Image (tube, rainbow, N blue to C red):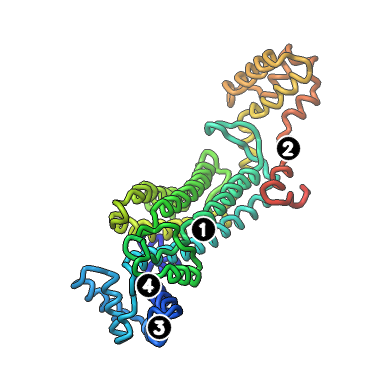
Amino acid sequence: MVPRYTRPVMAAIWSPENRYRIWFEIEALACEAMAQYGAIPAEAARTIREKGDAAMAAFSQADLDRIDEIEAETRHDVIAFLTWLAEKVGPDSRFVHLGMTSSDVLDTCLSVQMVQATDLLLQDVDAVLAALKRRAFEHKYTLTIGRSHAIHAEPTSFGLKIAGHYAEFARNRERLVRAREEIAVCAISGAVGTYAHIDPRVEDYVAKKLGLKPEDVSTQVIPRDRHAAYFCALAVIASGIERLATEVRHLQRSEVREAEEFFHKGQKGSSAMPHKRNPVLSENLTGLARLVRSHVIPALENVALWHERDISHSSVERNICPDGTIGLDFALMRLAGMMEKLVVYPDQMQANIESLGGVVHSGEVLLALARAGILREDAYRIVQRNAMETWTKLGHKDGKTFRENLAADPEVAGRVPAEVLDAAMDSNAHLGKIDHTFTRVFGEAGPARS
């Protein structure tokens, strides 16, 4: 991922330095396990640990360059690292990587990195949830117009809209936890996964120390259905980001202007039009979501490797693992900040509710007419007729409000009391059951309306 969309804390997880530290830890732990059951001398395992730890603590650009230099000759990254490590450890390095194959190190390391990345992503999701919860309760009783097909439907609560996104990200958090569990596996089973040259106890030991669990059947590599499921989870989260970003983009449209991204002092919206205040954050989030979702197909195609293993997945994962997690990390934190500072315009929301002359209350009026004894089919015809009369003459000098048209309709006048029509056109009636949803989503209803 380009630096513009990269947070250093996530980039560090995918850095060569972190990768080599994990590689060494896997090798050192394997040696410790082999020493415990007498496969290698205990003193050798201690030397490998002590000298290796010292080398990793002092790891510098010179070490990176040395590993690259070796790899340029060997054309093999793990062998290059092991050769560098041997230069640091000395003769006891002959016990390093004993009975292991490169995938034992590479796949287990990838699992560790993905777990590290996921733990950071979980923190990011928590930041989004915290921002959404605060804004949902803040605007629990802020009336706004609900829309279906982008057309005014009925009044709702802006806090309820945000609560829906909160519930989605709560589900996304659960998905991410499950994805972490599925990817947190270790494979140290040797060539083609038979343990012919290494005791399974080594795998158990390393897995436990790294906070992983042994892969059921590694076939030399960890099956890529796990990774595919992981990237599917990231993609669903990205879609949730885009859904909320799209909502903000629509609400910020000049014709709507119910909410907008915070506009910083000194910020410029356009090089040509000084008045512009563009939804650049939510547009950026939409683009990042597309990138994260794009990793699903190659991850799924990685599942079908040849026989016990091939490396067709390797080049894919070298790209999508860092890019996917780095991109999602950046997007989640940008989303959290955007929602925390989102500027909301309740007065404009109220104006938009009233902008169609009251026709948004047609559903409640329909019910009122039905309760008054009018057949539903007739009530629908009456309400629609008056709504269309209102809609088509909006802004005309002879135009009337929905309420006025209903009062003048002979099929309504005298059959439905005025106070019943007034109650049917009260937007606050749509907030009556909001505590039910808030309690279900947040576990609490929050303070009562003042």
Q: CA distance from mark 2 to mark 3?
A: 73 Å
Front-most of residues 266 and 379: 379
Identify which residue is drawn at 48% across, 56% down: 182
Q: Give whichever of discs 3 and 1 has the lower sequence position.
A: 3
Which tag is nearer the camera, tag 3 or tag 1? 3
Q: Residue furthest left?
A: 73
Identity, as a three-letter code, of the amino acid under mark 1:
Glu
Identify which residue is drawn at 34% across, 57% down: 317
Q: Secondary structure at mark 1?
A: helix
Identify which residue is drawn at 73% across, 12% down: 411
Percent coordinates x, y for residue 389 in the rendering: 61, 18
Identity, as a three-letter code, of the amino acid under mark 4:
Trp
Identity, as a three-letter code, of the amino acid under mark 3:
Ala
Q: Which residue is mark 1?
A: 181
Front-most of residues 73 and 406: 73
Q: Which residue is mark 4?
A: 23
Percent coordinates x, y for residue 426 in the rendering: 73, 33
Q: CA distance from mark 3 to mark 1?
A: 30 Å
- Residue 428 got which mark? 2
Q: Tell whether 168 sits left or right of 184.
A: right
